[in-house]
Image (spheres, rainbow, N blue to C red):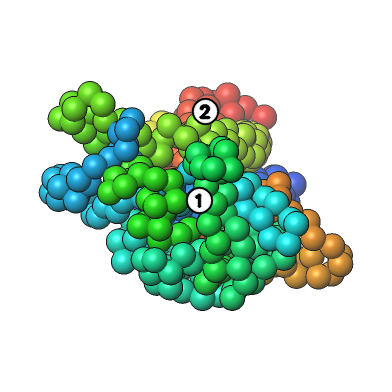
Amino acid sequence: MFKPLPLFIGLRYTRAKKRNHFISFISLMSMLGIILGVMVLITVLSVMNGFDYQIKQRIFAMASHVSITEYQGLGQWQRLAKKVDKLPHVLASAPYVTGQAMITHEGLVRTALITGVSPSLEKKVSLIAEKMVKGKLSALTPGSFGIVLGNKLAASLGVTVGDKLIVATPNVSVGVLGVMPVYRQFKVVGLFHVGNGFCFDSQLAFINLRDASRLYRLGHKVTGLRLKLDDLYQAPALTIKLLQSLPEDYVVSNWTQQYGSLFKAIGMEKTMMFLMLMLIIAVAAFNLVSSLVMTVTDKQSDIAILRTFGATPRTIMGIFMVQGTVIGLVGTVIGVIAGVLLSLNVTDLFALLEQVLHRQLLSSSVYYVNFLPSRLSLMDVVHVGILSLLLSVVATIYPAYRASRTEPAQALRYE
């Protein structure tokens, strides 16, 4: 005889017979519900991961993981850089000078945040060099007074590479003509494009570090030091460590203070979406309970005969748990495969839908991107698969327990 017996009979009961087509239909609907729930859940989580990844790429292409500043300007930054570069999790550091300015060109005036950088060092802490669409960041040589603009800022000023413009700072100089703002002519040597959503392309401009120190009259000082970490989530711990070791006039900040609430909101949305979509699988599991209860009722005489042949309540319970688990397992496996395939192709499918409808469904001014991103996570797939299978197994417990309590004499009374 086939062993184990519960597995053999349980698999046999999953096949339809002439007299129980309706029960098999209910089981099929339960399986389809599990497939749909798993597929949708994996796809939605992948899309949420895609949005999270795209936002992080845009932010951390420009933002500092950790920054160190001083109230009166940071002097002898080279010594500080050598010190912090030896700390755990610190990959590189780079000095910067930053300040507000007004940029004018042929009567057009725009405000911008000017950042002075050392091109060779800046490449180690940000991705600005990789975001250049015209020119190169290395063109910002000392004394050349070149400037790199965001492409939207350049478009609003009507300038491109090779054009000249005037940069005026809030600093003032006192001369024979009275109080005058400090200004300087710069030549556009490059344009960059980071992406929409955080105004980087419309409000930022870069110049050489030494030129910035002269423009803002800092002498040999800089505004601060930017640090890049191997794990950005170590930024808060490193901030505390630096605050404890540096003098009191130093200010240490990190990315969580500016963008932490945004990523917490994204994480909460992903969690809530996961919980809500798990209800689809829970409903399918509830349907599985209903179908198994109907199967138990239909198989009362079979259960009674098995009991008279010596089958124990544990064996009967195992039969119906096998039946429900198989339905859940097949639904979960097919759902995982469908969800993975859809997640890998949802970006192209969404683009195709936009072409068919002849309209853009996602606006970068609202969603930061103008396409539907997707980033499949193996852990999400594993978690969804395990929870789906677990719900399916739990759903079989009550019907299987009810079947195990069947009394042979009472079940066979009217047979």
Q: Residue furthest front?
A: 176
Residue 75 horizontal/vertical position (percent) = 24, 42
Q: Nearer the viewer, residue 359 or 412?
A: 359
Q: Amino acid at mark 2?
A: Tyr
In contact (CB < 8 Å): disc 1 and disc 2: no
Residue 114 is marked as: 1
Residue 403 horizontal/vertical position (percent) = 52, 31
Q: Nearer the viewer, residue 309 or 188?
A: 188
At 74% from the left edge and 47% from the top edge, which residue is drawn?
22
Q: Nearer the viewer, residue 61 or 358?
A: 61
Q: Give SS at disc 2.
A: helix
Q: Quick one: quadrant of the C terminus?
A: top right
Residue 392 horizontal/vertical position (percent) = 51, 40
Q: Is residue 271 above or below residue 104?
A: above
At 56% from the left edge and 69% from the top edge, which residue is drawn?
188
* Disc 2: which residue: 398
Left or right of 71 on screen, residue 374: right
Q: Quick one: quadrant of the N terminus?
A: bottom left
Q: Amino acid at mark 1?
A: Ile
Which numbered disc, 1 or 2, marks the residue closer to the eye? 1
Q: Give SS at disc 1.
A: strand
Q: Earlier in the sequence, mark 1 or mark 2?
A: 1
Q: Is residue 180 above or below residue 403?
A: below
